[in-house]
Image (tube, rainbow, N blue to C red):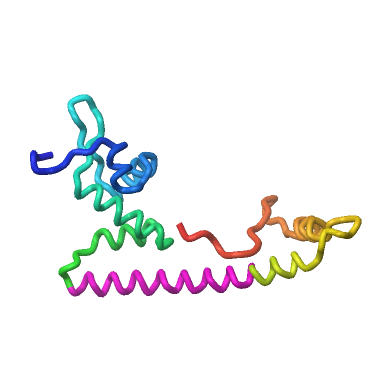
Amino acid sequence: MNQNTAAYRIGEAARQSGVSAANIRYYEKEGLLPPGARSDNSYRLYSADDVHRLRFIRLCRAMDMSLDEVRTLLALDLTRREDCHAACVTLDEHLQHVRTRLAELQALEVDLLALRSRCDGTDAQCHIIEALHQRADAQPLSDGQPTAAGPGKRHV
């Protein structure tokens, strides 16, 4: 790193960016952040640009963007028209994921409300727990493994 670049050890980069040190290491491993330079005593060092990149990643992840979506956005140049189009496509695809997830969550809310209405806590047995046990028994097995039930797969 040159003299004009601030050099933060991982703990300070974590504090400055709001990203944990463990996640900084993970983002390096995933290629979202270039590996930090090393000081003479082998500490990882991060620049102000690295801290900005970590904030960018944190912001995108807070919007529930997948690592691939973040990777795509990080690779784009804000001054190229083609890259602006790619950013729009990425965001449109993410919006579709969010809309799908909202529909899944609304269906889950309806299911939970119906489950909650089964019991007011005054009966001799809890009909909520009873219904959950019935559902657990009714779940089909696939190759000896329980299948996923309910909402779609997690957007990682």
| Residue 36 falls in image quadrant | top left
Residue 115 percent coordinates (x, y): 75, 65
Q: What are the residue bounds of the magenta stretch? A: 81-108
Q: Does residue 149 lie above or below 19 as drawn?
A: below
As displayed, is residue 15 above or below residue 130?
A: above
Task: Indicate yes or no whether the magenta region holds residue 99.
Answer: yes
What residue is shown at x 51% (from left), y 72% (from top)?
Answer: 100
Position of residue 87 measured from the top left corner of the image (x, y, whole percent): 29, 70
Q: Is residue 24 above or below residue 90?
A: above
Residue at the (28%, 48%) spot, across then down: 33
Q: Nearer the viewer, residue 30 or 125?
A: 125
> Residue 18 magenta-drawn?
no
Using the rendered view, name the quadrant where residue 120 is placed. bottom right
* Residue at the spot 35% in from the left edge and 58% down from the top edge: 59
Magenta stretch, overall SS: helix
What residue do we see at 22% from left, 37% from top?
45
Q: In the rendered view, does 1 fall on the left or right side of 36? A: left
Q: Nearer the viewer, residue 46 or 12?
A: 12
**Numbered circles on residues, count:** 0
